[in-house]
Image: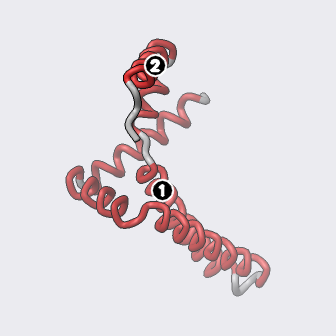
Amino acid sequence: MPLSEHEQKVLQELEQALYRQDPAFADRVRSENVYRYAGRYLRWSVLGFVAGLVVMLVFFTTSVLAGFAGVLLMFASLIAFWTNLRRMGRAGWDDLSQSLRAQGIGTALNGTRARLRDRFHKGQ
């Protein structure tokens, strides 16, 4: 059901007020979507799985408990990966893969590195 003219006008006024008060937040809200959110957590879950694998391989022979913690980290990462993959759905996966093909994997990684570098340098 489409919005009435009055509702559209109120929505536009709210958007304009948001842009005036906090333009950085408004830009982030405009650029953020479910696919990006889930895609970001897919990458973190892959990183968590690799970290769990490394912990398991390094510590399993010396400490079974630490090796088991690595296995638990791998399992939690797989659950997070599966959950976010289902959240994205086929349309989101296609959107993410097209974006990576268009930008190139190096450009996507450089953007992530720059965001992390900015985040950690702000605190110093």
Within 10 Å of disc 1 (Cα), the crowding (few <14, some 14-19, many 20+) is many
Quarter-wise, where is residue 20 in the image? top left
- Residue 66 lies, in percent from the top left, at 75, 76
In the rendered image, is residue 123 in sight? Answer: yes
Front one among 54 and 88: 88
Disc 1, disc 2: CB below 8 Å?
no
- Residue 113 lies, in percent from the top left, at 42, 45
Q: Which residue is mark 1?
A: 38
The local secondary structure at tag 2 comes to: helix
User: Is 2 displayed left or right of 46 in the figure?
Assistant: left
* Amino acid identity at mark 2: Val
Q: Quadrant of the N terminus?
A: top left
* Amino acid identity at mark 1: Ala
In the rendered image, is residue 51 in sight? Answer: no
Within 10 Å of disc 2 (Cα), the crowding (few <14, some 14-19, many 20+) is few
Front one among 63 and 15: 15
User: Is 106 displayed left or right of 85 in the figure?
Assistant: left
Q: Does 93 sit above or below residue 22?
A: below
Q: Which residue appears at 41% of the width and 46% of the height?
A: 112
Mark in front: 1 vs 2: 2
- Residue 38 lies, in percent from the top left, at 48, 56
